[in-house]
Amino acid sequence: MWVSRISSLGARTIKKLARGQLEYTPRIRLLHASSSRIDTFFQSPPQVPRYFCTTPAVDPSQGGKGEVQTINVTFVETDGTEKQIKVPVGTSMLEAAHSNDIELEGACEGSCACSTCHVIVMDVDYYNKLPEPSDEENDMLDLAFGLTETSRLGCQIEAKPELDGIRLALPVATRNFAVDGYKPKPH
């Protein structure tokens, strides 16, 4: 019974070491003048506070009034209707579409693991202002329906001040490998 307790204590200690919750510090302590023994002590590293914030960026030009900086984005839906929305800086186009009832699917919920949030940037100048697509995004775009030269994934386009006025067209269809016709709702 004591062996299993020691084993579980050792397993927990190894897990904590792997997660970085403990710091390995070997120390030597002399017990007698004639014999020595090495004891290992584990000490917790100093706790560093970690802060996580989901608050959107505040426009410093507003004099610190606490107003959220937004950009204008126009989504052109499959039937040709245009929907103009204001998107907070730092928000992905997929999140913006979901919060404004725009039919942009996003089956993987923005983890760049599908092509269902495929959008077409309608102006080449805005397309050139976007950062280069990652290899993962290019792999997913290869699966997209109706791929064009200015195609991107909506989950990978982040609202920035230089994109104010961007127009994004939704393709007429998507390739959802999960369930045909299913439209997930944001959480």
Image: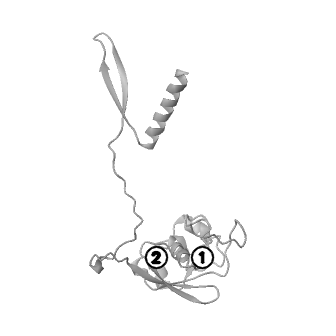
Mark 1 or mark 2: which is in front?
1
Q: Residue at x 62, y 72 (%)?
A: 116
Q: Residue furthest right?
A: 180
Mark 1 or 2, nearer chain start: 1
Secondary element under disc 2, as helix, strand or loop, is loop
Horizontal side of residue 167 vs 55, given as left or right: right
Question: As shown in the figure, which amino acid type bears the numbered disc 1?
Answer: Leu
Horizontal side of residue 5 vs 177, given as left or right: left
| Vertical comparison of 87 with 2: above or below | below
Which image quadrant: the C terminus?
Answer: bottom right
* Residue 34 at x, y percent in the picture: 30, 9
Q: Which numbered disc covers residue 2?
A: none
| Vertical comparison of 152 with 22: above or below | below
Question: As shown in the figure, which amino acid type bears the numbered disc 2?
Answer: Leu
Q: Residue at x 32, y 43 (%)?
A: 46
* Residue 72 at x, y percent in the picture: 45, 84
Q: Which residue is mark 2?
A: 130
Horizontal side of residue 55 vs 157, given as left or right: left
Secondary element under disc 1, as helix, strand or loop, is loop
* Residue 29 at x, y percent in the picture: 30, 21
Q: Which residue is mark 1?
A: 104
| Vertical comparison of 154 with 30: above or below | below
Horizontal side of residue 83 vs 161, given as left or right: right
